[in-house]
C-alpha cells in the first residue's frame, strides 16, 4: 500500500512539473484521438442518419454489420489496417505505417461504427412527429435529415463522446500502427504499457492518471456542450 | 379549377381500407369541413390530401395534376397540414416559423417579414424569442398555425386544430382561420368532430363515417 501511495505522489509530482516527455505524450494522444474522432464523426454521423432514415434493401445487414463492428477488438482493427498500409499492402506506397496518420486511420475505423450505430439509435429515438412535421412544411429528404440531426443533437453528441472514449483509451491500434515511437507516435496508453513492462511504474502511473484526467476533461466539456444543446 | 379531385380512391394500412372515396371534388378557394367521429378516417384522408402517402388504388389529382410517387415531393409544396399534435422544434418561436420558409426562395428580409406577420396574426409577437418548448399547449397550437400560414400555401389542411385546447384558444384559432379565408385565396380543408365548429367557420360540411365521405350537407345546413 505504501508503495502505491509513494508512486501516486511521485506520479502527481511528475504531472505537475510539466515534464516535457509526459506533456508530449499527452499532447500526441490528444491530437491523434481528436482527429480520428472528428474524421469518424464526419463519416459516421451522416452514415447513421442515412441508415436511420433510409429504407433500402440490405438495411438490416448494414445495421447488423455496424453492431458487430462495435465489438471489434482493437488489435483486429490494427491488424486489418496494418495489412493495408504495410509496405506490401495496397496503400503501402503512402508510407503511413508507424506514423500518426496510420494511427488516426486505425482509430477512425474503430470509432466509426460506434458513432454511426449510436447515431442510428439517436435518430430512431426521435419523436415520429418530427419527420411528419418536416414533410408537412415542404421539406425534402436532405432538410428532414438535417432537422433530425439538429433535434437529436444531444444524443448525437453522446455518440461522438462514446467514440472519443473508445479511441483515447485503446492501445492495440496505437501500438500496432504507431509503433510506440518516442516523441512521435507514443501515446498515453502505449507509454503506460511500455513503462510498466520496463518497471517504470511511477511514469506509467503518472500517464495513467493523465489519461483519466484528459478523458474526464474532454467528456466534461462535451457533456456541457450536450446539456447546452438540449 | 379544382384543388382536389378523387376518383375511386382507397387507402389503408395493410388490412381493409381505412378510407374509401368513390368520387370527391374540392373546388379551389373553398372551405370544406370533414365532419365525423373519431375513427371515421378523417386523419387518413387528410394525410392523403397532404400528399404524405399515395392512394392504394384510384386517382388523386391536385390542381389537375395526378399524384404519383415520383412527383409527390414537388406537389407537396402546394400543401401544408396542421397536425393534431404539432411538433415544435427545439429552438425559438420565431425560428420555428422561419423553418418552414426555407426553400421558398425568400431572402432574409422577406423571411423576417413573414415571420413577424405570422406571429402577429396568432398573437405571439411578444413571445418571438422564447424557446418554443416553453410555450403552453394553446400557445404551441397557435405557433404551429403561424408556422403553417407563414408559408402561404395554396392548400391548408387542418386536423382537429382545436381538439386539445381551451375555449379561449379555440376562439383565437377560429378567428385567425376566418380572417385568413376572407383575405386569401386559399383552399382549406378542416377535419373536425365538431359540426358546430364547421358551421361557425362557414365551411361546406362533408360527413365522414366508416372511412366513407359523402353524407354531404351544404353550408348552413345542420346535417352533421
Image (tube, rainbow, N blue to C red):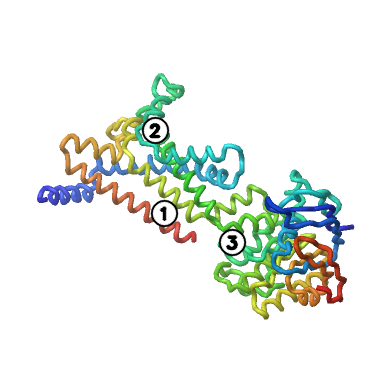
Q: Nearer the viewer, residue A60 or A166?
A: A60
Which of the pair A32/B100 is nearer the observer? B100
- Mark 2–mark 1 distance (CA, rounded to whole Å): 26 Å
Give the residue at the far left of this rendering: A2
**Which numbered mark, 3 or 2, is in the foreground of this view?**
2
Residue name at image x 49 percent, y 39 percent: A64
Residue B89 lies, in percent from the top left, at 59, 61
Q: Quadrant of residue A180?
A: top left
Judge if badges 2 and 1 mark residues of a common chain: yes
Q: How far from the left and from the top, in percent, is residue A122? A: 50, 52
In the picture provided, is B30 more to the left or to the right than B150? Answer: right
Q: Which residue is mark 1?
A: A222
Question: In the rendered image of this protein, does residue B2 appear above or below residue A38?
Answer: below
Q: Element type at marker 3?
A: loop
Horizontal side of A180 relative to B24 (left or right) equals left
Q: Estimate the spatial distance between the alpha carbons at disc 1 and disc 3, rounded to whole Å.
A: 22 Å
Which residue lies at the image location 28% right of the left edge and 37% below the top edge?
A190
Q: Are marks 3 and 2 in contact (CB under 8 Å)?
A: no
Question: Residue B94, relative to residue A175: is it above or below?
Answer: below
Mark 3 = which residue?
A: B89
Callout 2: 10 Å neighbours few (<14), some, many (20+)? many
Name the residue carrying label 2: A77
Say left or right for A70 vs B67.
left
Task: Determine the chain carrying the residue at label 1.
Answer: A
Q: Nearer the viewer, residue A82 or A55?
A: A55
Question: Pointer 3: residues within 10 angstroms few (<14), some, or many (20+)?
Answer: many
Q: Quadrant of residue A168?
A: top left
What whole-number distance in Å separates the C-alpha atoms at marks 3 and 2? Answer: 40 Å
Which mark's residue is nearer the viewer, 1 or 3? Answer: 3
Observer-nearest residue: B90 or A24?
B90
Amino acid at each position: 500500500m505504501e508503495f502505491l501511495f509513494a508512486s501516486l505522489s511521485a506520479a502527481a509530482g511528475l504531472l505537475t512539473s510539466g515534464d516535457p516527455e509526459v506533456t508530449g505524450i499527452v499532447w500526441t494522444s490528444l491530437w491523434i484521438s481528436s482527429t480520428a474522432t472528428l474524421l469518424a464523426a464526419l463519416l459516421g454521423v451522416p452514415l447513421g442518419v442515412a441508415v436511420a432514415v433510409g429504407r433500402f434493401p440490405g438495411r438490416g445487414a448494414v445495421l447488423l454489420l455496424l453492431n458487430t463492428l462495435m465489438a471489434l477488438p482493437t488489435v483486429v482493427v490494427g491488424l486489418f489496417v496494418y495489412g493495408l498500409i504495410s509496405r506490401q499492402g495496397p496503400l503501402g506506397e503512402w508510407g503511413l505505417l508507424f506514423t500518426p496518420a496510420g494511427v488516426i486511420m486505425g482509430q477512425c475505423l474503430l470509432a466509426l461504427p460506434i458513432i454511426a450505430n449510436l447515431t442510428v439509435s439517436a435518430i430512431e429515438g426521435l419523436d415520429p412527429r418530427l419527420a411528419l412535421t418536416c414533410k408537412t412544411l415542404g421539406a425534402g429528404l436532405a432538410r428532414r435529415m438535417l432537422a433530425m440531426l439538429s433535434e437529436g443533437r444531444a444524443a448525437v453528441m453522446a455518440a461522438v463522446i462514446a467514440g472519443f472514449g473508445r479511441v483515447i483509451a485503446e492501445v492495440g491500434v496505437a501500438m500496432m500502427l504507431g509503433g510506440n515511437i518516442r516523441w512521435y507516435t507514443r501515446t498515453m496508453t502505449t507509454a503506460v504499457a511500455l513503462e510498466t513492462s520496463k518497471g517504470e511504474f511511477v511514469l506509467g502511473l503518472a500517464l495513467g492518471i493523465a489519461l483519466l484526467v484528459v478523458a474526464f476533461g474532454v467528456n466534461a466539456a462535451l457533456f456541457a456542450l450536450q446539456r447546452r444543446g438540449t | 379549377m379544382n384543388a382536389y379531385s378523387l376518383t375511386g380512391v382507397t387507402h389503408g394500412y395493410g388490412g381493409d381500407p381505412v378510407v374509401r372515396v368513390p368520387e370527391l371534388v374540392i373546388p379551389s378557394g373553398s372551405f370544406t369541413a370533414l365532419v365525423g367521429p373519431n375513427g371515421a378516417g378523417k386523419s387518413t384522408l387528410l394525410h392523403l390530401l397532404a400528399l404524405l402517402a399515395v392512394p392504394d388504388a384510384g386517382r388523386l389529382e391536385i390542381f389537375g395534376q395526378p399524384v404519383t410517387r415520383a412527383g409527390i415531393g414537388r406537389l407537396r409544396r402546394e400543401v401544408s397540414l396542421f397536425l393534431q399534435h404539432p411538433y415544435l422544434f427545439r429552438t425559438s418561436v420565431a425560428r420555428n416559423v422561419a423553418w418552414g420558409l426555407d426553400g421558398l426562395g425568400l431572402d432574409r428580409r422577406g423571411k423576417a417579414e413573414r415571420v413577424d406577420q405570422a406571429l402577429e396574426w396568432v398573437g405571439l409577437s411578444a413571445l418571438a424569442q422564447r424557446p418554443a418548448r416553453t410555450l403552453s399547449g394553446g400557445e404551441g397550437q397557435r405557433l404551429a398555425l403561424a408556422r403553417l400560414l407563414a408559408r402561404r400555401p395554396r392548400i391548408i389542411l387542418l386536423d382537429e386544430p382545436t381538439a386539445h385546447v381551451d375555449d379561449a384558444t379555440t376562439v383565437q384559432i377560429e378567428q385567425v382561420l376566418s380572417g385568413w379565408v376572407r383575405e386569401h385565396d386559399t383552399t382549406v380543408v378542416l377535419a373536425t368532430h365538431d359540426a358546430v365548429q364547421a358551421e361557425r367557420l362557414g365551411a361546406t360540411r362533408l360527413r365522414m363515417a366508416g372511412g366513407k365521405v359523402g353524407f354531404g350537407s351544404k353550408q348552413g345546413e345542420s346535417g352533421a
